[in-house]
Image (cartoon, rainbow, N blue to C red):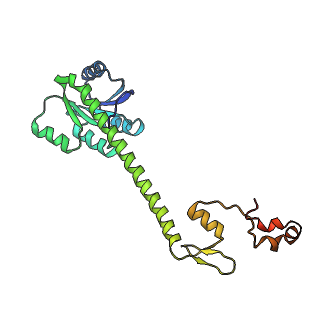
């Protein structure tokens, strides 16, 4: 399933150095990604953006004094777990890199290799969209299965023993409620009834018509 990124994306950048943010902006522009970027450097501002203006992707430095990258990652995974979180940082050791992935980061890009940022963001957005579409398909599948099971349950009810009143011909449903025959079949089989008179009943209800018009006794249905 191929998903393309062709819309303007909202980027939330956790960075305290304005000059670093400019370099990241330039890398995104150079990659051809249409975007709107917002930079924050405090926990309060970060939470406000997550809650009020959820981004499409989060870029974060590792070592902010007021909000560490790991703390931002934990908040993002709690508030918006579906949004890709990418570290844009200086060189990190293998142990730290492994920890970022274990904590739920999508990827990381070194600041001295910002040419990689565009492709990494595109890949992360495609993966997030594919997961979203997969969840929608699973939801539709579960809904269809539920509807099918409900339909089969109704068919099973009709294929078993139906309790019908010998006098008024009402039917007792699975909830032990008595319903007119027409109502019961409309609910369980989605059928509509067109009332008429059979040849046996026509003389009973319209004796004069049958007397003067014998063919009325052969009426199978009167709309």
Residue at screen point 56% across, 76% down: 162
Left or right of 212? Residue 8 is: left
33 sits to left or right of 116: right
Whether residue 131 is situated above or below residue 142 in the rendered picture: above
Task: Tell me residue 167's x, y (percent).
Answer: 69, 80
Point out the residue furthest to the left here: 94
Query: Which corner quadrant of the image does residue 112 belong to?
Result: top left
Q: Nearer the viewer, residue 207 or 4?
A: 207
Numbered circles on residues, count: 0
Tell me if residue 66 can be seen. Answer: no
Dividing the picture into quadrants, the one containing residue 12 is top left
Q: Residue at x 36, y 25 (%)?
A: 35
Query: x, y percentage for residue 89?
Result: 19, 29
Establish if 200 lies above or below 60. below
Is residue 210 depicted above or below 110 in this figure? Answer: below
Decide if residue 142 is on the left or right side of residue 159: left
Q: Position of residue 223 (x, y in %)?
A: 75, 59
The answer, for residue 134, to whether it is visible in the render is yes
Residue 104, image quadrant: top left
Camera-nearest residue between 176 and 101:
176
* Residue sitting at x 59%, y 63%: 187
**Residue 193 % position (x, y):** 67, 62
Q: Quadrant of the N terminus?
A: top left
């Amino acid at each position: 399933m191929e998903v393309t990124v062709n819309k303007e994306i909202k980027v939330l950048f956790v960075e305290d150095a304005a000059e670093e943010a400019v370099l990241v902006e330039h890398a995104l522009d150079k990659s051809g990604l249409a975007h709107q970027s917002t930079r924050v450097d405090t926990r309060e501002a970060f939470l406000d953006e997550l809650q009020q203006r959820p981004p499409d992707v989060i870029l974060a430095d590792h070592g902010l004094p007021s909000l560490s990258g790991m703390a931002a990652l934990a908040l993002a995974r709690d508030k918006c777990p579906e949004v890709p979180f990418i570290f844009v940082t200086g060189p990190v050791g293998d142990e730290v890199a492994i920890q970022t992935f274990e904590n739920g980061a999508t990827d990381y890009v070194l600041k001295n290799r910002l040419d990689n940022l565009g492709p990494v963001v595109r890949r992360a957005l495609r993966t997030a969209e594919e997961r979203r579409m997969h969840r929608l398909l699973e939801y539709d599948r579960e809904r269809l299965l539920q509807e099918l099971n409900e339909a089969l349950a109704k068919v099973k009810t009709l294929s078993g023993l139906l309790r019908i009143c010998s006098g008024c011909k009402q039917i007792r449903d699975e909830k032990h409620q008595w319903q007119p025959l027409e109502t019961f079949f409309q609910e369980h089989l989605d059928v509509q009834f067109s009332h008429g008179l059979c040849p046996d009943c026509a003389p009973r209800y319209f004796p004069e018509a049958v007397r003067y018009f014998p063919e009325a006794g052969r009426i199978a249905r009167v709309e």
